Each structure stands twice: as C-alpha cells, then as structure tokens.
C-alpha cells in the first residue's frame, strides 16, 4: 500500500463477489411494505423460484448465445403462464 504498489481495480460487474449480494438487495426493498413476516417470506420464495426457473445459465461462466437465452426465456414464460392459468 505504498507509493510503488499497484492495486488492481476491477469494475464491480466483473467481480462475482460484488454481484452475489445483488439478488438479496433486489428482494429486500419490496418486502418493506409487508405487514407480516410470513407474507414477505412467501413472496421472496416465489420470486426466487421464478428467477431460478427463468435463469438462462446453469453455471456463472457458461456462455449462452442471445438467441438461445431468448428461446429459453420465452419457453419459461409460456410455461409459467400456463401454470398460473391452471391455478
């Protein structure tokens, strides 16, 4: 940490550690309006299940082309719509 040291500075988008807490932050803010913990828990659980269902990759570094991502997303959305209409 002196004058001669070089510190690597990476944008946070390339750092998986920085990205790992992002889903938690996205879930936390909407739950502030829930009056009951169990309702917030059910909502967060449903959001997690849907986001994992629509996830285009199985591994973080896996490459998936844009056309394949779109096909998987559209297939997942149509399956969710059928599931919600049946319920």
Image (spheres, helix red, strand yellow):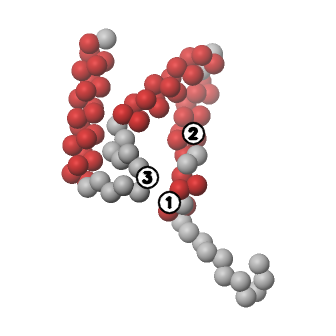
Is residue 29 shown left or right of residue 1?
Answer: left
**Mark closer to the observer (2, 3):** 3
- As drawn, the label of residue 13 is 1
Q: In the rendered image of this protein, does residue 43 appear above or below residue 76?
A: above
Is residue 8 shown left or right of residue 14?
Answer: right
Is residue 68 shown left or right of residue 55?
Answer: left
Q: In the rendered image of this protein, does residue 38 appear above or below residue 68?
A: above
Q: CA distance from mark 3 to mark 1?
A: 13 Å
- Between discs 3 and 1, the one toward the N terminus: 1
Q: In the rendered image of this protein, does residue 40 appear above or below residue 87?
A: below
Using a 10 Å C-alpha cutoff, classify the residue at mark 2 as few (fewer than 14 neighbours), some (14 to 19) or many (20 or more).
few
Residue 29, picture quadrant = top right
- Between discs 2 and 3, the one toward the N terminus: 2
Label 2 secondary element: helix
Using a 10 Å C-alpha cutoff, classify the residue at mark 3 as few (fewer than 14 neighbours), some (14 to 19) or many (20 or more).
few
Q: Position of residue 4 (x, y in %)?
A: 73, 88
Seen from the viewer's position, the closer of residues 36 and 59 is 59
Label 1 secondary element: helix
Q: Position of residue 22 (x, y in %)?
A: 55, 46
Q: CA distance from mark 2 to mark 3?
A: 17 Å
Residue 8, picture quadrant = bottom right
- Dot 2 corresponds to which residue? 24
Q: Position of residue 85 (x, y in %)?
A: 26, 15
């Amino acid at each position: 940490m002196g004058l001669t040291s070089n510190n690597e500075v990476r944008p946070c988008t390339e750092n998986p550690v920085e990205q790992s807490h992002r889903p938690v932050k996205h879930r936390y803010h909407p739950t502030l309006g829930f009056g009951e913990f169990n309702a917030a828990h059910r909502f967060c659980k449903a959001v997690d299940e849907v986001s994992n269902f629509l996830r285009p990759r199985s591994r973080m570094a896996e490459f998936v082309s844009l056309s394949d991502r779109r096909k998987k997303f559209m297939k997942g959305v149509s399956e969710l719509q059928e599931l919600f209409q049946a319920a």
